[in-house]
Amino acid sequence: MGSLTPSDPRAPKDVLVDRYREHGYLWLKGLLPRDDVLAFRAYVFAAFADTGLLAPGSDPAIGLAGGAENADLARRRTMELVRSAAFEAFCLSPPLWRLLDGFLGGMSYLHKRKLLRMTKPGQAFSTPAHYDLVYLRGGTDRIVTAWIPIGDTPAAMGGLCYLEGSHAEGRRLEAAFAAENAELSAQERISAYNSKMGEGGWISKDLVAMADRFDTRWLIADYEAGDVILHSPYMIHAATANDDPEGRIRLSCDIRYQNVRDEIDARWSNHWSFDDML
Ligand SMILES: O=C(O)CCC(=O)C(=O)O
């Protein structure tokens, strides 16, 4: 394992673009106002007040996991939040869209399908290794994902980790899939769940074996509220388990931008639903 390299969001645009092209990611330290991010964390967890997600009587701003969650109600609250004006406004924070306008070389477009994720301490599932284009094959590959930790997220809380240098491997894998998928119908060809793909589009759940297979390392970081990571749609990444000794829930969102002039994957033009098969 190794550490991600941080970037200063105030660095000249060309420096940031070159670094993104070389490394497949940009860890932008403090791009968003820290207080806004912490206020949004409190807003999100306050919406779960009736679900048992949080420890009884605890401050929603902390996001302390409780033991008696009503999972159906919590899922409903998540679906409400991803449709809320507050989430939309958070994803359209001026420092973010301004940076992306420059970065994408024109007006940036935010895909409507925006994911808000929580990982509770001790939760068995964490996101397996994958690259994002598998889910976004119906448009341009000039997509940029922004992964935003909503609250301080030290590595022990299970933030995103990246397979070093893997955006080149992602391109090779995608070219191989394109060749294998060539005889499928247009609709099947772009699906992450077609007969030629691994389960759910994941590359692997065994992160150690992957680093060995590609002879590289996983890069991790202690993220802070205000940080934003941009990653290439070919960059292989995953999330680790949340082992926070303080019992806090990891909260983050992952959202996608592109230049509005590039082809848009129409399947992402609806709000996220748990069963949308994307
Ligand atoms: O936050 C996660 O667990 C996964 C996020 C992700 O896969 C992404 O940002 O593309």
Image (spheres, rainbow, N blue to C red):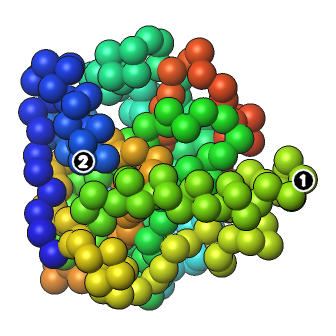
Q: Looking at the picture, which amino acid does disc 2 mark?
A: His
What's the residue at 11%, 63% (across, down)?
Answer: 3
The percent coordinates of residue 33 (x first, y second) are: 18, 32
Residue shown at 33% from the left, 75% from the top = 214
Kindly report the distance in space between the C-alpha atoms of the residues bearing marks 1 and 2: 34 Å
Q: How many marks?
A: 2
Residue type beneath disc 1? Ser
Query: Where's residue 203, x and y in %?
Result: 52, 74
Mark drawn on residue 250 = none
Q: Quadrant of residue 96?
A: top left
Q: Quadrant of the C terminus?
A: bottom right
Q: Quadrant of the N terminus?
A: bottom left
**Residue shown at 38% from the left, 53% from the top:** 167
Left or right of 227, for residue 42: right
Using the image, determine if residue 19 lies above or below residue 191: above
Q: Are marks 1 and 2 in contact (CB under 8 Å)?
A: no
Residue 185: assigned label? 1
Q: Earlier in the sequence, mark 1 or mark 2?
A: 2
